[in-house]
Structures are given as structure tokens and as C-alpha cells.
Amino acid sequence: MSIKEADRVLPVTTRESDSTRERRSVLRPSRIRLYEPLVIGTLSVVLALTVWQLVANARIWSVLFLPGPWDVAQAFVQLFQSDDIWLDIATSGEELAIGYGMAIVIGLLIGLLMGWYTRFQYALDPFVNFFYSTPRIVFIPIFILWLGIELQPKIAVIFLGAVFPIIINTMAGVRNTEAALLRVARSFGASDALTFRRVVLPGSVPFILTGFRLGIGHALTGLVVAEYIAAKHGVGQIIAIASQTFQTPKAFAGVVLIACTGMLLTTVLHRIENRFQSWRPQIK
Amino acid sequence: MYDRSAKLAAKGVVIEYWLQRSRSLFTAVKGVDLEVRPGELLAIVGPSGCGKTTFLNAVDGLIPIAGGSLTLDGREITKPGRDRAMVFQQPGLLPWRTVLGNVVFGVEAQGSMSKGEAIARAKQQIELVGLKGFEDAYPLELSGGMQQRVNLARALLTDPEMLLLDEPFAALDAQTREMMQLELLKIWSQTRKTALFITHDIKEAIYLADRVIVFTRRPGRVKTVVDIDLSRPRDLRVKRDPQFLTYEDEIWESIQEELAVPAERLIAGVPAA
Ligand SMILES: Nc1ncnc2c1ncn2[C@@H]1O[C@H](COP(=O)(O)OP(=O)(O)OP(=O)(O)O)[C@@H](O)[C@H]1O
Ligand SMILES: [Mg+2]
């Protein structure tokens, strides 16, 4: 029979469901496919936590060395019951907001200028290369010397950490503008300003947002390391003191707090990135 | 000598590229003489790499000429202008803009229309090229033929005196190409714009044009001019007309002579990719 023959050429994997073969529109995933990332992701996290808990329960190492997830959770709750925590969070938050905020504004500006004006790039390239290839945290002692142990040295190191990935990615975005699009703009007599605003800038958005996202990682590194070294308050300081005083679960709780902040900010940026990509067909 | 009635006049046009790698000048076009009459649709055919795109870019004002003169309405062409609009071989659409946004881009860049007017006219133009209902689609959601319609509509919306088309249908499949040719003819017969059309496809050239110009191999020059005396309006049947086939043979032979060169000269003529 002809239907039987048609069946034979179907890929092996769909054989069993031949009779009930589901009809779907292209690019419209089934419900299960939609939730698959979430389900598998959650399961793997649960699995990892379970293994961790079991290893900790075995008590091969003391809780001071390896607390289990439950210990960390308890420490986390305790942490938020202490009086100082909000001051610490406010301090770190302020440092982060100012340092990262400045990095976004200045990095974007310099990156766009360097991408658009070749001569500007030639002039600044040596400095960008110098700072970008140096781990910015090596400047912390100097900043502490210059700026003390209040917020300023942290802001400086956060700024320095985040600004270069933003500059470099923004510049790459501008530079990567498709030549064909520039030729179209020129052919229709577009002014430089219009070409920049309507062609170069929108095309650079994905690069710019990638720069922002990379910047967050560098900013958090700068923040925590600077607070480890010298600070009055701050989440980095909590971690440093907790581990020095063998409150290991509390140190872990601090780490979780930093990690959550990083993930939260990265997710927000991912969302923004997706908004800007609505024109891209979602092919999976 | 100088024909005042010509829309576009090219006299001994030489175009050179500077090759940074070999630090030498490369002559792509050498001594093109041609005239395009007002309202005429002139097609240029020629072997690949003979300088057709190069010549068209110079007409659009995107690249300078190294010798000769190139005038539009008697004025020397030095830069792109509102009197010309190019339909590119690659559609060159802004991927983040919808069809409507892309069609208005040309007039937006020229600053020649208010936004409201541009949008209203763009909608008509979109209808004219057969894309009604796709105003809000993004380029990546369109087929190649539809993207070329957007490319065409963008150029038409600027209402140029001269339309420059660089193999606009080359990337399309045979059926879509024939449909697009038909539509281009329809639009052209309504507007009667002067048009310079580059193509690889001899049939396409004969079908569309009033005259077909054959370029020599690189460095390109005008080799033959063939007047196409086929009545308009033309439909697809004209492609089977005996006269059509005669033109086809004539042009094919002319190009053939340009291809029939010793292999070593062909290789020597093409710069390493
Ligand atoms: N930007 C460039 N720099 C250097 N050489 C170039 C450049 N563009 C084109 N050429 C050279 O000039 C010659 C003519 O190129 P052009 O693109 O005008 O050919 P064409 O006739 O349009 O060919 P095709 O029919 O394949 O599109 C070619 O030999 C090519 O290698
Ligand atoms: Mg070409």
C-alpha cells in the first residue's frame, strides 16, 4: 500500500508515532518543547544540590570546611535577620550602581566615538589595550592609597572593570556595520548623522548589550575583591570576615548573594537583548 | 558631437581601483562611451567581471572616475543625488526595520518628504510592487523575491529621474524572475523613467530594454549596441518571437567572442581572490 511505503521513508525516530503523527506549524514549538529548558535545568540543579547535601551529610569534612546546602540556606536566613546586612547591601549596591552606571555612559560614548572615528580609535587604542589586558584589580592597592577605604576606590575599580568590555564591544558593533547597508545609505544621500543614527547604532545594539553583560561580571569581580582587601561595609566584606572567623556557611551565603545579583542583572540584560531582536525569526 | 538630448552621457569613462595588496592600480573600465536617452530602458550585458557594476556605481556617484566624463543632464556626476536611485543586487535591507520602514528609508535618507507623506506613499508603492499585507513583516521573514520588491519599492519611492538596477533579479528562481520582469515592465511603462539595467541574462535584457549594450571583457568598453525593435507592451510570449531569437543569437555571439580568449589571459586578467 502506498501509505505503508511512505512510512518507510520516514526517519526511524518518528516510526512509533506514525499513526498519531502530530501536525505542527513550522517554528511553533509544542508545549513540552517550550518548557523543556526550564524542566531540565531545574532537575539538574536539584540533582546537584542533592549530591552536595549527601556529600556534606557524610561528614567526611566538618561543616567548617564544607557546609551543605541546608546549612547555607539557614545561614542565608540568619544573614538577613542581622542588623548590618542592609547597610552592607546598600553600600555594595551604591558602589555597584555608581561604578557600573558610569561605565555604561562613558564606555558607550567612547566606544561609539572610537568605532565611528578611526583617528579617535588610533589615539585611544594604546590605552584601551593597556587597561584591558591588565587585570583591573591590580590597581586596587593604588586606589586605596589615593582614595582611602570608603566607597571611592571600589567605584573606581568597578568602573575600570566594566568600562573596557563595554568600549571594546561597542566599538566592534560600530565597526561591524555591514558594508552593503552603508553603501545603500550613501547611495540615497544619507548624512553622516542619519547613517549613524539609523544604520550604525541600531546594528550595534546586540554588541553593545553584550558589552554591558560582560561588564557586569567584571564589575562584580572588582566590587568583591576591593571589599575583601579593605572596606568598612559591603557584601564582599561579609564574605571575607566570615571565612576568616570560620563561619563558613555565612561565607557561602554571601557568595550566593553575589551570584544571585550577577544572575539577576544578566537575566535582565538578556531580556532587553531579546526585545531588540524581535525582528529575528526564532529558529530553534 | 555632444548630444544635448541624452539623459546620461558617458565619454571615455575610465575607472580604476587601487589594490592595496599589490600596490598597483587596476583598471576595471576603460573608455566607456554610451548615452542613455530620456525615458529609455537601456540594458548592459557582458562577461562576468568586465566592470558593469563598477560602471553603474560610478553613475550612482558612489565611486569616482579616473578619466573621461560622465554627465547626467549635462552636469558632471560627482556624488549620489536625488535624481538617481539604485536597486542593488543584494537587497541591502535593514533587518530591524519592517517592509514599510525599509521602503521609506530612501526618502528618509534624502530628507525629501515629511514622515506622514512618506508613509502614505510607501504604502501605495508597496501595493504597486505586490507586497500588500506584508507592510509589517521583517526582511528575514520574506523570500528573496519579496526582498527584491522591497529594494525596488525603496528606490521607486524616491521618484528618481533615473533608475539604476544592478542585476536585481539575478538571485531569484526562474519563475519569480519572470514575474518580477513583468512587474518591472508594468511599473516602468507607467512611469517611463530612464533606466539603466545590468544583467547576465541575455533574454532578460532583450525582453526589458529598448537597447542592449554589450561590454567587452575587462577592462570593460562598449562592444556592440543592439536596438531592440519589439513592440510594447511586451508580454512573455515575445520571448518566442523569431526577432527575439535573432537578437539573442546576435548578443550571445558578441559575448561569446569576449569569452573565447586563451585561458592564460583569462587567468592573468583576474586578480587573485
Ligand atoms: N572594490 C574593488 N576593489 C578592487 N577591485 C575591484 C573592486 N570591485 C571590483 N573590482 C574588480 O573590477 C573588475 C570589475 O568588477 P565588477 O564588479 O564591476 O564586474 P561586473 O561586470 O559587475 O561582474 P559581474 O557580472 O560578475 O557582477 C573585476 O575584475 C573586479 O575584480
Ligand atoms: Mg556586478
Image (cartoon, coloured by chain):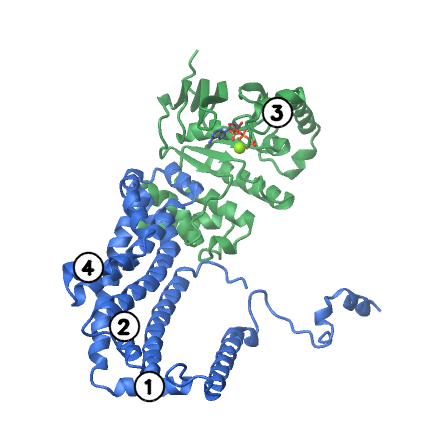
Tell me which amino acid carries mark 2.
Gly
Q: Position of residue A7 (x, y in %)?
A: 77, 68
Q: Position of residue A42 (x, y in %)?
A: 49, 79
| Chain letter of disc 2 in the image | A
Q: Is residue A5 above or below residue B253?
A: below
Quadrant location of residue B265? Answer: top right
Tag 2's secondary structure? Answer: helix
Q: Residue at x 18, y 67 (%)?
A: A151
Horizontal arrangement in the rendering, residue B253 relative to residue B49 (left or right): right
The color chain B is rendered in: green
Tag 3's secondary structure? Answer: helix
Q: Which residue is mark 1?
A: A75
| Chain letter of disc 4 in the image | A
Tell me which amino acid carries mark 3.
Ile
| Residue A194 shows in this picture | no
Q: Which residue is mark 4?
A: A143
Q: CA distance from mark 2 to mark 3?
A: 67 Å
Q: Residues within 10 Å of mark 1 (few under 14, many from 20)?
A: many
What count of labels does the image hold? 4
Q: Toward the viewer: A251 or A82?
A: A251
Q: CA distance from mark 4 to mark 1?
A: 33 Å
The color chain A is rendered in: blue
